Amino acid sequence: MSEPLPTRPPRHRGIYLLPNLFTTGAMFAGFYAIIASIGGHYTDAAIAVFIAAVLDGMDGRVARMTGTQSEFGVQYDSLSDLVSFGLAPALVTYTWSLSALRDYGPLWGKLGWACAFIYAACAALRLARFNTQVGVADKRYFQGLASPAAAAVCMSFVWSIEKFGLSGADLCFVTPPIMVVTGLLMVSRFRYFSFKSLPIGERQGVPFVWMVVAVLLLALLILDPPRVLLAGFGLYLLSGPVWTTWGLLTHRRRARRSAA
């Protein structure tokens, strides 16, 4: 009777803790941003959201590098994103600026929290739609503005204004359209370039020009982080409508030429 073939012991599932730790760290940073804004520390709150964005970008890459992707991790990451890039920016912006609309009457006060809610609800809808399109969507592009980028626009705005020495109450009529437009762009059909398609952290090489761009961006961030981030993410926010509109116009021109 032949001896049974040795079976390979199952892989220890403790390694799944690693990417989920990054996800937990991102959620903690988003939660801290809410607490900091309640205490009036708005610059700290904005920086915490950016830290959450960095950690959120790392958990997926760590999971892929270690082969520890799981459905649990996907769902946990979505819940973390809702806290860090949906609720945190909405509540930080409300306590910083939108709540000041109450001084102009009850109707203005309701408008303030309604704008914050619209942003948070759009972030939730954006994440739900993204989860349902994971297997069919083109990984090179996002449909709608990604929630971390939307949060970066709002928080770099808060950070920049705070650095100028102004208060959110001074801009309480400017903040509502920023929140509503950013929220609606998350659930729009505009196409945004996905930087996940770049071979960062993989064995594929990148063009030399990317290294030069990275050095220049790092130098600019050191000089003036809030305004550089606001300018960069502001341009990225506009790139979706511009890129999509340009693509539609180009497609129509080609259709006319082929029909002629």
Image (tube, rainbow, N blue to C red):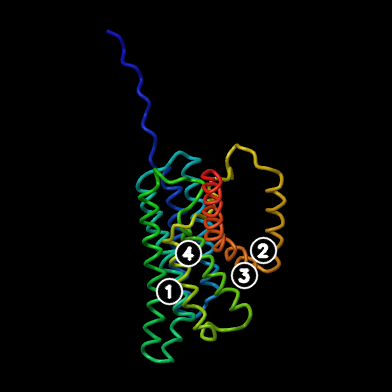
Nearer to us of marks 3 and 4 is 3
Q: Kindly state the secondary structure of the residue where label 4 is placed.
A: helix
Residue at mark 4: 29
Mark with earlier residue (3, 1): 1
Residue at mark 2: 221
Image x and y of residue 38, in percent:
44, 78
* Labelled pair 2, 4 in contact (Cβ < 8 Å): no
Mark with earlier residue (3, 4): 4
Image x and y of residue 76, in percent:
37, 54
Q: How far apart are marks 3 and 2 (CA)?
A: 8 Å
Residue at mark 1: 91
Residue at mark 3: 226
Q: Distance between the residues labelled 3 and 4?
A: 18 Å
* Labelled pair 3, 4 in contact (Cβ < 8 Å): no
Mark with earlier residue (4, 1): 4
Q: Kindly state the secondary structure of the residue where label 2 is placed.
A: helix
Q: Distance between the residues labelled 2 and 1?
A: 26 Å
Q: Kindly state the secondary structure of the residue where label 3 is placed.
A: helix
* Labelled pair 4, 1 in contact (Cβ < 8 Å): no
Q: Residue type at mark 3?
A: Pro
Pointer 3: residues within 10 angstroms few (<14), some, or many (20+)?
many
Q: Residue type at mark 4?
A: Ala
Nearer to us of marks 4 and 1 is 1
